[in-house]
Amino acid sequence: MFIYVDGDACPVKREIVEISSKYQLKVIIVLSICHLTKSDGFSEYVVVDHRNQSADMEIINRVKGGDIVITDDYGLASIVLMKRALCMSSRGMQYTADNMDLLLYKRHMNQKIMRAGGKVKGPSKRSSSENRLFVMNFENMLKKSLYNSQ
């Protein structure tokens, strides 16, 4: 099992690495050259070009069933789910077949409003409680996944 992180704007990379290292799971952070950061000494960094969707395509090409992907991109999450991998947002929400249609529909409607010149409300400012929720849900996902693979 690998942990893939859509790393360009992921605010919980440190938390992912801490928890994954506890379970000795490999973390692969995929990011564009524009977002390259100093290595954390544990994760593998995959650097892609700065073109739109390059990081997403790299993750799609690598991910396999049973892997875990952390992303806030609904489109990437829907493809990851089709490949039988698990997927979670950086805010701790697990993407599932049950919630994906609604999330994609909302994204479509927001894009439609913006193309027509309207404005849509963005996500709220990140809170420390969301970080705690992510840590709790991510660790629970890892435990369940590891338990089911044995």
Image (cartoon, rainbow, N blue to C red):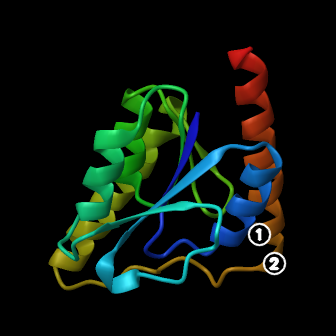
On screen, 91 above or below 78?
A: below
The residue carrying mark 2 is: 128
Q: Position of residue 47 (x, y in %)?
A: 34, 68
Q: Residue at x 63, y 69 (%)?
A: 13
- Looking at the image, can residue 101 be seen? no
Q: Quadrant of residue 90?
A: bottom right
Count of number-bearing discs: 2
Cα distance between the residues tagged 2 and 1: 5 Å
**Badge 2 vs badge 1, beta-carbon distance below 8 Å:** yes
Q: Position of residue 59 (x, y in %)?
A: 36, 49
Callout 2, which amino acid? Ser
The residue carrying mark 1 is: 131
**Is disc 1 placed on a helix, strand or loop?**
helix
How packed mark 1 is, by other alpha carbons closer than 10 Å (few <14, some 14-19, many 20 or more), is some
How packed mark 2 is, by other alpha carbons closer than 10 Å (few <14, some 14-19, many 20 or more), is few
Q: Position of residue 82 (x, y in %)?
A: 37, 29
Depth check, front residue: 2 or 103? 2
Depth check, front residue: 118 or 30? 30
Left or right, 128 with respect to 14, comes to right
On screen, 111 above or below 146?
A: below
On screen, 74 above or below 48?
A: above
Question: Where's the N terminus, which quadrant?
Answer: top right
Q: Residue at x 65, y 62 (%)?
A: 42
Left or right, 27 with respect to 34, comes to right
Q: Residue at x 74, y 59 (%)?
A: 134
Left or right, 135 with respect to 53, comes to right
**Is disc 2 placed on a helix, strand or loop?**
helix
Callout 1, which amino acid? Asn
